[in-house]
Image (tube, rainbow, N blue to C red):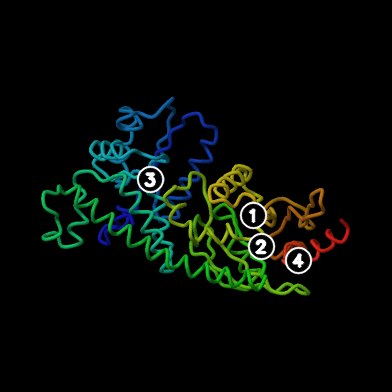
Amino acid sequence: MLDRPADDASHASTAVLVGLDFGDGDYAENLEELRQLAASDALAVSTVITGKRSRPDPATFAGSGKVNEIMLALEQTGASLVIFNHDLSPAQQRNLEQRLGQRVIDRTSLILDIFAQRAKSHEGKLQVELAQLEHLATRLVRGWTHLERQKGGIGLRGPGETQLETDRRLLGKRVKLLKEKLAKFQSQRDVQRRSRQRAEVMSVSIVGYTNAGKSTLFNRLTRAHAYVADQLFATLDATTRKLFIPEHGPIVISDTVGFIRDLPHTLVAAFRATLEETVQADLLLHVVDAGSPNRHAQIDEVNKVLKEIGADSIPQILLLNKIDLIDLSPAAAGYGRDEYGRITQIRLSAKTGEGLELIKLSLSEAMEECALQRRASSPEIGNLVGRYATLNS
């Protein structure tokens, strides 16, 4: 996590944000999201440095003039941290820290720090540490001696090894150990998943952009007590509960980690085991903040990550949440069906419970369809179909 000395907490928790416009389109939204990320990491923003460039500067990303502007902002505000709303190369990060005399991190490092603070379960902490170490592995340069100091130093260095080689070797061993531990968790989940499949229990995963209201909806549906807060990445650890649907029986419903634009690949890789609950689901409830001006872009980002983990072919129901916060009529809750009669979109408020019955209706219909598909694909039905075809040939 980011260093915040107890004797100088206010100074250490003040940051200068830097966001440059390269003409990509969603500049204002990206900058606002960076503010939210900083707030989620308990950082006070002293200044936001903006500017336009056609391409990043190879040495410092921002160019000499903008670096001088950042330096002046640091001197005037007393901030001790600079956060770029972009991915910096190891050389750019090192050059900036040498020029500015303060710590410099990029968007990926900020998200990793938030994840490190929010992970509560043992598996979640292992996943975050793995992501941090794999991110660090790309940035090992001379001077990264903390790994040796943590381990005691003397006696660990191999013959003829430089400090950099030693650090890489120690880091590689720790990454291997973390992957082995996470593989055991994955095996346990595989056993549980096969047990549910044998019992023909339908599996549903709640997905969506971070802070869209997934955990609030999960709590409403299952009467669980998952942590809820109005901040990005309020909860990371996947939670699974059973939900009973009248006349149909139980389903298994899972609350998953929220997505965000430019989600670090190291995080997607580290959380792949947890996200397999999403990949193996029979149905996805895609929660969207209906009041967000960026909701369409957020839907696209979620679908992009779903495609990356191989879950893009799973049926979805789009849940337009937080209708209590936007200017709609009292009877705003409702739903839409596709040309096959399936419910594909529901307007609701997870906070007030408005529209909740529509979700249960959609789950009931999905369970009926899932049961029909399983019966049609069962060996007994297949044999009957085969015998019928033989008799009529």
Circle 4 or circle 3, nearest the eye: 4
The three-letter amino acid code for the residue at tag 4 is: Arg
> Rounded to the nearest whole Å, what is the CA distance between mark 1 and mark 2?
13 Å
Q: Which residue is mark 4?
A: 375
Position of residue 284 measured from the top left corner of the image (x, y, whole percent): 65, 57
User: Which residue is at a point 19% across and 44% down the rendered structure image?
Assistant: 142
Q: Please indicate whether residue 60 sits to the left or right of residue 187 in the image.
A: left
The x and y percentages for residue 29 are 53, 40
Which of the two labelled residues, at mark 4 and mark 1, occupies the earlier sequence position?
A: 1
Q: What amino acid type is highlighted by mark number 1?
A: His
Q: Nearer the viewer, mark 2 or mark 3?
A: 2
Amino acid of disc 3: Ser
Q: Which mark sits nearer the N-terminus, 4 or 2?
A: 2
In the rendered structure, the answer to whether residue 81 lies left or right of residue 357 reads left
Is label 1 or label 2 in front?
Answer: 1
Q: Which residue is mark 2?
A: 350
At label 2, the amino acid type is Ala
Tell me whether the residue at label 4 lies in contact with that at label 2, contact meaning CB atoms closer than 8 angstroms.
Answer: no
Residue nearer the viewer, 100 or 299: 299
First along the sequence among labels 1 and 3:
3
Residue located beneath label 3 in the image: 46
Q: Residues within 10 Å of mark 4 (few under 14, many from 20)?
A: few
The residue carrying mark 1 is 286
Mark with earlier residue (4, 3): 3
Residue at image point 50% right, 46% down: 33
From mark 2 to mark 3, how far is it between C-alphas? 35 Å
> Residue 175, how many percent across, how many down?
32, 57
Q: For numbered disc 1, what is the local secondary structure? A: strand
Dot 1 crowding, Cα within 10 Å, few <14, some 14–19, many 20+: many
* Front residue of this view, candidates 105 and 131: 131
